[in-house]
């Protein structure tokens, strides 16, 4: 059984099990990869996270450029 985790950082909630980002009572739409980037950043809060770490965690065994990551970061902001 997978643990259902929810991270709260007011006014947002990141529901890992349902892959949803909530702002108050509203679900914000994120692509699967953008959600994965946000999840990685939240789970490593307080730590320096490099581009290479994000690429390895979110796009393993796939060559992607910086622009792909930049789009995800822009969407998160």
Image (cartoon, rainbow, N blue to C red):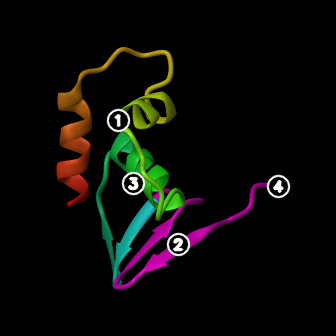
Instruction: Specify the segment rendered in magenta.
Output: 1-19
Is 17 included in the stretch rendered in magenta?
yes
Above-or-below relation of 34 to 4:
above
Which mark is nearer the camera, 1 or 3? Answer: 1
The local secondary structure at tag 3 comes to: helix
Residue identified by numbered label 4: 1
Residue pictured at 46% horizontal, 35% vertical: 53
Which mark is nearer the camera, 2 or 1? Answer: 1
Q: Using the image, tell me which numbered label, if any, was put on residue 7.
A: 2
Which mark is nearer the camera, 4 or 2? Answer: 2
Residue identified by numbered label 3: 38
Q: Looking at the rendering, which quadrant does residue 51 occupy?
A: top left
Q: Looking at the rendering, which quadrant does residue 59 occupy?
A: top left
The local secondary structure at tag 2 comes to: strand
Tag 1: Cα neighbours inside 10 Å, few (<14), some, or many (≥20)? few
Q: Using the image, tell me which numbered label, if any, was put on residue 5.
A: none
Across and down, in percent, residue 1 comes to 82, 55
Tag 3: Cα neighbours inside 10 Å, few (<14), some, or many (≥20)? many
The local secondary structure at tag 4 comes to: loop
In the image, 75: left or right of 18? left
Tag 4: Cα neighbours inside 10 Å, few (<14), some, or many (≥20)? few
Tell me which label, 3 or 4, sits earlier in the chain. Answer: 4
Residue pictured at 17% horizontal, 30% vertical: 67
């Amino acid at each position: 059984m997978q643990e259902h985790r929810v991270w709260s950082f007011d006014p947002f909630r990141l529901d890992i099990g349902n892959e949803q980002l909530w702002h108050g009572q509203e679900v914000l739409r994120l692509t699967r990869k953008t959600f994965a980037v946000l999840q990685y950043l939240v789970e490593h809060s307080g730590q320096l996270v490099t581009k290479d770490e994000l690429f390895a965690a979110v796009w393993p065994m796939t060559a992607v450029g910086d622009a792909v990551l930049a789009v995800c970061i822009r969407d998160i902001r």
